[in-house]
Every structure is written in structure tokens, then in C-alpha cells.
Amino acid sequence: MKIIILAGGLGTRISEETNDKPKPMVLINGKPILWHIMNIYSIQGFNEFIISTGYRSNVIENWIQNNKIVNSNSQVMKISTVNTGMNTQTGGRISEVMRIFPGETVMATYGDGLANVPITQILKFHASHKKLATLTAVRPPARFGHLVMDKNKVVRFGEKNQADSGWINGGFFVLEPKVIKYIESINEPFESGALTRLTKDLELIAYKHNGFWQPMDTLREMQVLEKLASLPIPPWLTDLD
């Protein structure tokens, strides 16, 4: 099954790193975060990637053309790119790639987040519910200190528990071919467009992932991932069964 990776956005919230490259090419422990994302899939046996590019697409294309890209088990990854345009939104990027492979169920994810998602389990979950789309629901990482107060008196101060934050869309989608009919324009986000329509038609299901998930929206989050990537086994590669 093919995996679409959305790698065409401007990455303005981490502009210190993205003036000369798209955000998926920001290095984490010496390798682009794009490689780390593909590695999550590849070491679990899913090895065919379509990179949807846009902003500075040549950086990704040159990296693929000029390097033998292997996963952490030294297996070669099969990677191709589709330039979906500078201003195309996430919905359009997904639809433009899906049109190239009509009739195929695909997986898709964003080019800036890492998680120890069990891909085979997600696919089984998707198949058992017989819906058009599955997303992975995750707990957002705690970003701020947590205050517990009694009127104006602070009774407890500390880190907010990640499990206290509810569920959000963590990406890592499974999409049936008919999903393309829910994407009305290349100029609309997948999240507020197709996912909203799929929800209205009761065709969207969520796989709840209680494990590790971390986006890279800021320099601070990049530094967090950099530190974690230096571990013998990064948390996004643990407990994948």
C-alpha cells in the first residue's frame, strides 16, 4: 500500500529553519524528519512512498535522486515525488496524488510529526469498521505548566499531564478511493474540508493512539525531537507491535 506524505507547505512557524528548505527536510539528528517519518512505516513493512511536494520541491527531489535512502534496517525505500504546487492545501495535495492511483486504498500523513503508531493494527482497525477514512487520534503534548487553584490560591503547580488534554487529529490516515469525492478543491485544507464532510456522512473513524506522538511546529519542538533522536531507540520506534 502506498503512503502519501504531505511535504509541500511553507513551514512559516519554524522559518528559522525553512528559508532554504521545506520543513520535512529539517534535520533531526543528521537526517531529515521526512526520513524519520518514512522509517516508521518502512521498518513495519510498508515501503512505497509518494512525497507530495510544493515549496522548494527541488530540495526533496535532489535528496532522493542523489542518495541511496535506506531505513534503519538498511532496506532500500521506494520513493517518488509529485509536485502538487506551491499554494495547494492539504486536501488538494492528497487528491492530486490519489488521482494518479485511482481505485487504490492509500495511507497518508503529515511531513512534520513522529509517532510510534502500529501501522498493521491501524489497517486492521480500518478494515474492520468499513468506513471511507480512518485518522489516528492522539493526545497533544503538554506545552505549558499546569496550575490547580482554589480561588486565587495556587494549590498545585507542575507539568500538565498529556492525557488531560483530550484527543486531536494526529494524522496517519487510511483513505479509501471514494475519499477523493469529498475533496472539493485543491485550495481547501483536508481537515476543514473533506474530514468535516466525511464526519457528517459518518464515514470517518478514529484509531486512538495512546503512545508517543510529537509534532515539529516550533524550534523548541525541533530541539525536543533532536534530543530524543539521539537515544539508542527513539520513542517513535518503540512498541510498534
Image (tube, grey):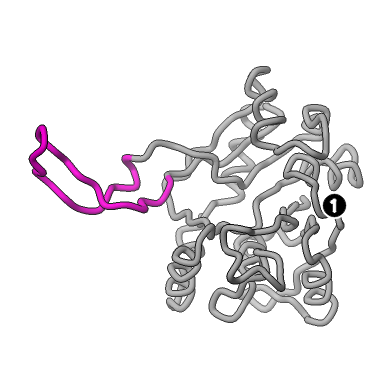
- Which element carries disc 1, helix, strand or loop? loop
- Front one among 56 and 237: 56
Q: Horizontal and vertical percent for residue 238?
A: 46, 63
Report the residue marked by disc 1.
84
Q: Where is residue 43 in the image (x, y as percent from the top left)?
A: 62, 65
* Residue at 53%, 57% in the rendered image: 217
Name the foreground residue: 106 vs 141: 141
Residue 101 to residue 166: above or below: below
Q: Where does the magenta region start and end?
A: 140-164
* Left or right placement of residue 80 versus residue 39 in this view: right
Residue at 12%, 46% in the rendered image = 156
Horizontal side, residue 221 vs residue 192: left or right: left
- Magenta-drawn stretch contains 16: no
Residue 28 locus on image (x, y percent): 56, 74
The percent position of residue 109, horizontal first and vertical second, equals 66, 50
* Residue sitting nearer the eye, 224 or 103: 224
- Residue 148 appears in which quarter of the rendering? top left
Query: How many residues crowd mark 1 within 10 Å: few (<14), some (14–19), many (20+)?
Result: many
Image point 25% across, 53% down: which residue? 159
Q: Is residue 58 left or right of residue 45?
A: right
The answer to whether residue 233 is left or right of residue 36 is: left
Which residue type carries mark 1? Thr
Looking at the image, which residue is at 85% across and 52% down?
84
